[in-house]
Every structure is written in C-alpha cells, then in structure tokens.
Image (tube, rainbow, N blue to C red):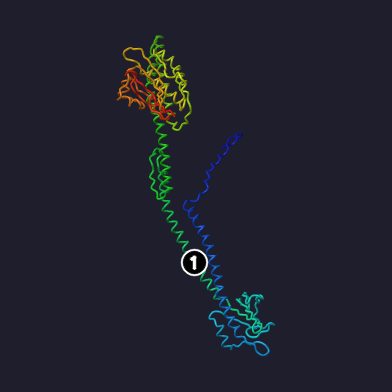
Amino acid sequence: MTQPGVPAAPAPKPRRRAQPGPRLPSLRSRVLQHVLWPLAGAWVVGGIVSVVVASVFTQRTFDRALLDDAYSVATSVRPVAGGLELMLTPREVSAVLYDQTESVYFAVRGPDGNLIAGHSGLYAPGPAEDVGYRFSDIHYQGRALRAVVVRRAVPQAFDVVMAETTHSRQALLRNVLVLSVLPQLLLLAGLAFWLRRAIDRDVRPLAALQHAVERRDVRDLTPVPANASMREVQRLGEAVNGLFARVNEGVRMQREFAGNVAHELRTPLAGIRALAEYGLAQKDPAVWRVQLERIAQSEERASHLVEQLLAMARADEGRSMQLQPVQLDELVRDTVLRFLPRADAAGVDLGARGIDDPLVVQGQPALLEGILTNLIDNALRYGRPADGTPATITVAVSVQPEALHLSVLDNGQGISAERRSGLQRRWAQGPEGEWLGQGVGLGLAIVQRYAELLGARLVLDSGPQGRGLAAGVVLPRS
C-alpha cells in the first residue's frame, strides 16, 4: 500500500519483443519459381497455340467435307420446263447426306430465293459475286449449325445451302485438347518433382556448409569442409575458408603482439619494481638518485621496446604500399644527425659516406627511415669492441648498376655466419641472446619486414677488414 501524499511509482513498461524480420524465401523455392513459372507460361501459350492450330485445321477438314457434299447436290440439279429440279430420289439424298453422328440439312433455292428442294427455312449468307462459296455459322430449329452456300450459274443461277451440326468438330477439339495439354501438364508436374529433388541434392552441400559454420566454435578458425557438386558452392566454401584464414592471421598477429609485449616488458617492468622497492628501503638521498637514474634507464628501454613493437605491427599490416621517389642522401644525413647526441654520449664515432651527391630511390620515407634507425640503434647497442678500441659506426651508401646498398658498419665483436640467421627472428634468445647479454628483440625483424615491403632484402655480413658487422639492405634501382 502507498502512503498518503506519496505518489505511486509508475508501473514498469512491458519490454517490447523484437519483431522478427520478414521471412525470406528459400533458395530452393526461388529456383523452382524461376524455372517453373516460365515453363508454366510457355506451357499455357503452347496449349493455346495447339488448340488454335487444331481448331483451324479441324474446321478446314470438316468444312471441306461439307463443301464436297454441297457440290454433290449441286451437280444433281437439272433444268426442267419452267425451272430447276433436283434429280435425286429421297433415298439417294439420304445416301449422299448420310452421317453417323451429325444431322445434315440442305436446301436448293432458285435465283429468286424460292425453295427447289430440301428443308424450308434453311438460310445462310450467300457468297460474294467473285467467290463461288461461303462458310458461316447459323442457327436452325434451335441448333447451332455450320453452313456453306455454293452458288452456281450453269445451267441457271441457283444456290445450294448445306448445313450440319458440330458435335464431331467439338469432340475432336476436346480430344486434341486432352491429348495435347494433359501430357504436357503431366510432364510439367514430373519436371517440377525432378527439379525439386535435383535442387535439394545440389543445395545439400550449401546447407552442410551453413551447419558447419553455425556449429563452429568462436575460437576454431580451421577450414570448414567444402565438398560441393557445383562450382559456386565450392567458391563460397573457399571464400569462407579464406575469410577464416585472414581472421586467423589477424588473431595470430594480435596474440603475437600481446605475447611480444608481455614477454619483452616483463624484464624491464620487474627491474623497475625491484629498483623502486630497493630505493624505498634506503634512507640515503644519494642512493635514491642512483635508483631513480636506473629506473629512468629501464623506462627508456621499455619505451623503446614498445615503439619497436608498434613499428613491427604496422609493418605486418602494411602489405601493399605505393612507392614514391625519396631523396636518400638527405634522409641518411638527417637520421645520422638525430643520433649524434646519443653517439657522443656513448663515446661512439658516428659518420656517413656516399651521400655527397644527390641520390633518389623509389621507396617509402617512413620505411627507409625505420630501416636506418633500427640498424644504427642495434650498432650503438651491440657494436662496441671488446678490446677497448674506440667504437666507430659508419652509414655507407654504395651505388651499383642494378642495386643500391644501404649499410651500417661497426667495428664491434661481429657475429658469426651461424648466428646471423637466428638474429633475423623475433625475440632471438638462446645462444644469440646469451652472447649479446640480452634478447635481440625486434630491430632486425623490423628491418627485414620493411625491406620486404620495399622489394629489398636484408644482408648481414662481416664489417671492414673482417671485423665487426655490416648490416644493410639491397634496394633495387627501378
């Protein structure tokens, strides 16, 4: 119960159920409609044409027989004194006009229309002057008759009217209609039954493909079976499997990216946490400063790794890129100048050669800069001599007739040929990582991917005089 003065809470509105969409016809019914409706229309038109043609030829056949009977009667008309006379006895007339199924009537009339012989009251439209006979449909004694009027001028002018009932004509038309239309109707029904079975058989692989996709788990991106008897269904299955492959590749890249981030950032983040905990446990400000500097260095390394990961992800996504002219000498000069402060702080002599003259190549500025940046960064990290000799790094551009070599040379410890192939893999650990003191990371993998996008190839070789490492790419000159 509600309290006085307190308005009652409004009743909750019933949730409106989602209205189902329009029911779409199935592929089976659509194909049957597209096939059977034109066939039914053709059958109707063909039946009408058959009936009309049969009616015309039946009419002509019976009319010809009726005309022959009229001519037979006309040849028996003879002139007599005072007029014309039919020279046939009643028995002969009956024999001439005998028909098992039809009632036959005739009349012979003189030029003034008077009846010479036959049935009185039997009239029909006469023919034109230039035509010897004329057919017409008349009614006589309550019956529908087919009549013909034959006009003769010898020995005197007279008309012969011959008429008969149309039972035989109608029976023949019915027989033609039944015998021509009914088989076609049965054939159409049989064709519809056969088409339905054939369509069911051909659509069954499509339904199987639908069920396979519906039952597929969201994590299962393996190809679905596409056993089809038609090329279109097979192509649909191949398209679905191609989509699964692309989605699987995207999921794999996402998992790899997430795994790369978790794998590589675990160490610097754990180090930052350890340094912070150690600094918090001390009370000497000098120790705090040292720990903060180490934390800053670890954060810089983690940021660098994140940038490399993002660059690698962009490289994996950029599979089709438009190349454009790039001023390579200016790009090398700007990149080297950007690394000079870091090289000076590390006591490394960084320089470049082969960029005195303008040099234009087909490529992408971002990719070329990424290649050069990662090669110089790797050289600064790992290309230091172990005997205390001053470290030198040189960016060299060498122009060949068919290719252009962009290399970064150092005088460090170098890498054996057995280890170079392993360094081009992402996160090269194991012997290579132990030898370098840490995982190689993504630098050379990024360079290799960028080179592939530019149509170039990554080359790892010994440095000058067999010392150090020469890492670079070979760009085609086109």
Q: Viewed as shown, does residue 39 lie left or right of 294?
A: right
Q: Position of residue 165 (x, y in %)?
A: 58, 77
Looking at the image, residue 454 lies above or below residue 146: above
Quarter holding the N terminus is: top right
Q: Quadrant of residue 424?
A: top left
Quarter holding the C terminus is: top left
* Residue drawn 54% across the image and 79% down it: 101
Q: Viewed as shown, does residue 444 lie left or right of 334?
A: left
Q: Which residue is mark 1?
A: 182
Q: Nearer the viewer, residue 410 or 207?
A: 410
The amino acid on which the numbered mark 1 sits, given as a three-letter code, is: Leu
Q: Position of residue 335 (x, y in %)?
A: 45, 19
Could you say whether the residue bearing mark 1 is in a helix, strand or loop? Answer: helix
* Residue drawn 45% across the image and 16% down it: 337
* Residue drawn 52% across the image and 46% down it: 21
Q: Nearer the viewer, residue 19 or 438?
A: 438
* Residue drawn 52% across the image and 43% down it: 18
Count of number-bearing discs: 1
The furthest residue to the bottom:
81
Q: Position of residue 25 (x, y in %)?
A: 50, 51
Q: Quadrant of residue 412?
A: top left
The furthest residue to the front:
401
